[in-house]
Image: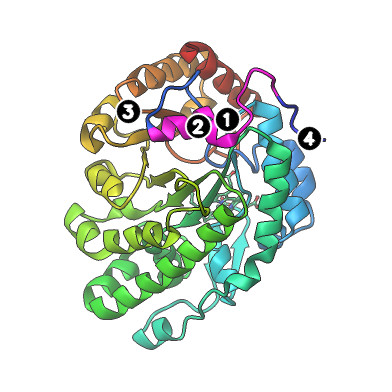
Amino acid sequence: MTVAPDPVRPVLPSASDLVHAARGLPVSRTPVWFMRQAGRSLPEYRALRAGTAMLEACQDPDLVTEITLQPVRRHGVDAAILFSDIVLPLVVAGIDIEIKPGIGPVIADPVRSVADVDALPPLDPERLAFLQTAVRQLVAELGATPLIGFAGAPFTLATYLIEGGPSKEHARTKAFMYAEPAAWGRLLDRLAVSAATFLRAQVDAGASAVQLFDSWAGVLSAADYAERVLPHSRAVFDGLGSGRVGEDSVPRIHFGVGTGELLPLIGDAGADVVGVDWRVPLDEAARRVGPTRSLQGNLDPAVLLADRATVDREVRRVVEQGRAARGHIFNLGHGVLPDTDPGVLTHVADLVHELSAR
Ligand code: CP3
């Protein structure tokens, strides 16, 4: 089954509301998609994934295609996001990682020394053929709906490599950053090259936008972020280059959680769109990032577990406050929580479209 083309929508993803909002161009209505829209909130996802490990599923082009399309069909969102994971480039490079259900990525041999940094294997782009097959299949199925490619930012990937798994404080990561600044720089350089390679493969195969997830950057002070992290995130965007030959570069979205104090810097790393969590209202976020970047966000995912009147009130507020931005892509402030009723997501997508129709 393919996504039915809608005759009133544009025929090219590059002319979609998502891409236009990202560039600060006029839109027919506020585009909306949800971080983690593909995943455990959908029964059809759970059925398809049954019996296949997460990282195996990510390397099967037909499964990736089908799982990526599920939320687009169901919710009528304005973008698909590739079904993958931020640790996948590390896995493809040969690092022993497992995604444990309900926990997240677990690394068999965490990076704890300078020698460990220097022993990390590089990512060979030739091993990303499966990813490019999935992207090509998706672009063919999606028609005018843009596909967002993504990668994990160097800092957030470093937290998993150094901690060995998910962590709250990221204390080992920060200790390594302070104690071994040269090795830290080399580690983030390598992760930047790998992220750029991973994004480039997706863009070359036809992705219409990219998102760089620096989910845990909010644990850093602005000074440390600016000095020890931002140059490496910028290197990812620089390494991505201008995009497909003869075309404008695809829009770049840059997102982290708890980044209120970092918002101007997150933009400076090279983003067209700054992703905002629920802690800073979008009108205030627009002041912080300035008039040259669009915003994405920022409904608290927990609101979707509340009553319908609360959901509607909060959606209205986010749409209203988003009008202060150069362009606004409606999203959650972080990923869909697993217990979310998918019907509420469909309702939110419809309501955003209705409230913003021009
Ligand atoms: O729908 C989408 O957004 C696309 C797919 C996607 C996944 N992971 C699939 C996934 C995306 C964009 C990601 C990014 C990702 N992965 C991030 C950045 C975004 C964020 O949430 O901050 C991070 C930090 C990871 C690492 C990771 N992978 C975590 C923390 C977890 C969750 C562990 C859990 O089970 O709660 C994963 C696993 C994961 N990635 C799942 C999915 C659908 C769940 C796996 C399952 O279904 O068993």
Instruction: Tell me where residue 314 appears, x and y as whole percent.
Output: 42, 19
Residue 2 is marked as 4
**Camera sees residue 33:** no
- Residue 294 picture location, percent across and down: 35, 34
Query: Which residue carries the number 3 mark?
Result: 326
Question: Which residue carries the number 1 mark?
Answer: 78
Magenta region includes residue 67: no
Give the Cα separation between the discs numbered 2 and 1. 6 Å
Q: Residue at x 68, y 65 (%)?
A: 129
- Which residue is rendered at x = 77% and y = 52% of the image? 62
- Vertical placement of residue 257 versus 234, above or below: above
- Crowd tier of the residue under label 3, counting other residues whose Cα lies within 10 Å: few below 14, some 14–19, many 20 or above: many
Q: Disc 4 marks which amino acid? A: Thr
Which residue type carries mark 2? Leu
For the N terminus, the image quarter is top right
Are the two marked residues, 2 and 1, in contact with CB atoms closer than 8 angstroms? yes
Q: Which residues are drawn in magenta?
A: 6-23
State how far apart marks 4 and 2 are (Cα): 20 Å
Q: Nearer the viewer, residue 56 or 33?
A: 33
